[in-house]
Image (spheres, helix red, strand yellow):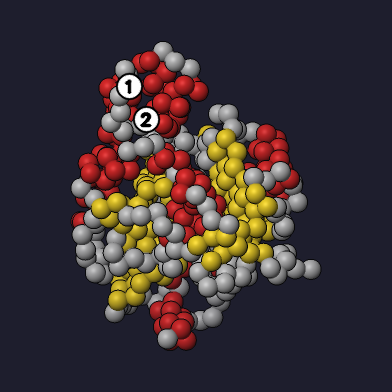
Amino acid sequence: MALMKRNVGPIGIDVSDHTMEIAQLRSVVVGKTATVHGYARNVFAPGIIKDGRLLKAQEFKELVRGMLSNPDYGNFDTKSVVLAMPEHQCYHHVFTLNTIGDDRLLYNVVQEKLVASIPFDIAEMLWDWMVVRQDGAVVVVYAVAMRRDVVESYMEALRSLGLIVRAVEPQVYSASRVFWPNLILEEPVVFCDLGTSETSVSTIDDYGIHQSSIQSYGLWQIEETLMKQLRVDRATAEKLARSIGLRKLNHPKIADIHSAIKGHLKDLVEEVQQHISYYHVQRHARPGTLSQLVITGGGSLIPGVPEVLANSLKLQLRSQKEHTLYQPAFSPDDFALYVNGLGAARRDVNSEQDDINVLVTRRQHDTKPQSWWSRFTQRTSKQA
């Protein structure tokens, strides 16, 4: 029995500490337009998920069940799921390996590198990797690892609902599928996902996702500061942040509103500056200037925040115009919220393409008595 109906793709599920987005697309993309089968979003109280960890499985299952049965648009018509894992629980690494004089399987070499890089026992991790570039005798590998217990807690909850988790990948990996045709960018960008309570910052360049980090910056922190400074309730604080933000308007408390938002934005600026500095000291196949900024997520909807962040960093703010159009079309605000879920939904789970999936480290199963260099050469020659 097929796991998915032929005319639909998987359900992409994007989870964070306070929100969850679910989306499903038709599996066949006509031209540059993808037909939306269904989507749903839910904002929930703190405590169900914390720092990307699932703490209350029963409440989580009720949320998913309710969203699947009562979507905001359309419906969901498959049991197959791709999970975009919160960046809190994702450890990204890029390894530059010299192939000369090393006849071990590349899997073993990457595993050794991860053992030396991850602050956990490798047996406690789920991980996967892919070759992102080959320059002469040098191979560049992108690897990602996640804690096994964290991933399995989500999988157990989803399986209990009759869902089949086909792939688990980092949120930024899912999002990149929406904006770019592949992970390797000749023009490097800083990618910021400004969420409800945290923001992930990633550098994507000619080696793929070169680094990723998390900052405690989001709408909730801004609201709490406004509540304290202005002595208002959360609903009023949210309205002030979303309607006024950093715009220059006549309002008796405009200075306090701007101060609350910029105060939190300062730490994010410093974090992005560290990413920029790190990029410029790393080895690259085609060194360039990291000058572009892509911003998405709910926090990006606060008026003026994307522009002020870009100006503070002296980066060019790129449009959120998606790589593929959708039917029915998403509003710019909704698109910013659904990027990760849409990226997960765009994954072709039936393809043999070497996409990252920590559930199956597929490249470890080669038992042929060949060096990894011989196997890589054979694979690339077939693709040429």
The picture places residue 286, in percent across and down from the top left corner, at: 24, 69
Q: Which mark is residue 251?
A: 1
The picture places residue 333, in percent across and down from the top left corner, at: 47, 45
The N terminus lies in quadrant:
bottom right
Identify whether 118 is placed above or below 353: above
Q: Are marks 2 and 1 in contact (CB under 8 Å)?
A: yes
Q: Is residue 169 visible?
A: no
Q: Residues within 10 Å of mark 1 (few under 14, many from 20)?
A: few
Q: Residues within 10 Å of mark 2 (few under 14, many from 20)?
A: some
The picture places residue 243, in percent across and down from the top left corner, at: 41, 31
Q: Which mark is residue 268?
A: none
Q: Which mark is residue 244?
A: 2
Residue type at mark 2?
A: Ile
**Quadrant in the rendering for residue 67:** top right
Give the SS element for disc 1. Answer: loop
Q: How many marks?
A: 2
The picture places residue 25, in percent across and down from the top left corner, at: 61, 60
